[in-house]
Amino acid sequence: MQDVVTELKSRIDKTLDDLRKDLTKVRTGRASPNLLEGIRVDYYGTPTPLSGVANISTPEPRLIVIKPWERNLLKDIEKAIREANLGINPMNDGEVIRLPFPPLTEERRKEIAKQVKTRGEEHKVAIRNVRRDANEQLKVQLKDKAITEDDQKRLMEKVQKETDDGVKKVDEIVSKKEKEVMEV
């Protein structure tokens, strides 16, 4: 019967990790190699992560430099970045690709902050769905006489407490990212 709460905690933690990972891809005023995480480059017919075919560095706060291990990949990398639709124009000089990040306008920062909030809300809904699943399991256990009504009530309170904690953590993660986005 305790496994319902343990599973709930585990699923909430996975949801929080997913949110953190999701928000690393959100553009702030700084250049971050995490923005390029989902980009795949055609490497001899195989879609390969960008980090698997090139060295990615941030020599300045508003610049990412991509140096491919093979020069013939420059065009493919440039194409993959354009297709990723990051809103950044890659500059290819024949040796490396530079991604200059223009400073964000106030309007764009607010737009990004709104996207961050939306992603937070989506993850809160996921946590509430996990709560619903846990409560359903408890009802089934009660019906099957695996637990008593008192146990069910106590466990449902634990489930609610874990859910509230998870939602609170989502709010903390989102507000931290919003601050980061709104920072000039």
Image: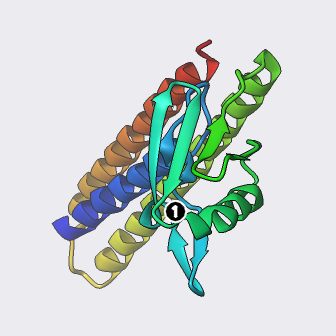
**19 vs 5, nearest the viewer:** 19
The residue under the point 56% across, 27% down is: 30
Question: Which quadrant would the C terminus be assigned to in this image?
Answer: top right
Answer with left or right where residue 153 lies relative to residue 106. Answer: left
Q: Is residue 113 above or below residue 1?
A: above
In which quadrant of the rendered view does residue 138 lie? bottom left
User: Which residue appears farthest toward the left when viewing the image?
Assistant: 2
Q: Is residue 61 visible?
A: yes
In which quadrant of the rendered view does residue 15 lie? bottom left
- x and y, in percent, of residue 12 in the image: 37, 55
User: Which residue appears farthest toward the top when viewing the image?
Assistant: 184
In which quadrant of the rendered view does residue 62 lie? top right
- x and y, in percent, of residue 64 in the image: 55, 39
Does dot 1 land on a helix, a strand or a loop?
Answer: helix
- x and y, in percent, of residue 152 in the image: 28, 62
Residue position for label 1 = 50
- x and y, in percent, of residue 150 in the image: 23, 58
Which of the colour schemes (rainbow, by chain, secondary structure, one colour) is used? rainbow
The residue under the point 52% across, 29% down is: 177
Q: Is residue 9 above or below residue 7?
A: above
Answer with left or right where residue 133 lies relative to residue 36. Answer: left
The residue under the point 43% across, 66% down is: 52
Answer with left or right where residue 26 lies relative to residue 87. Answer: left
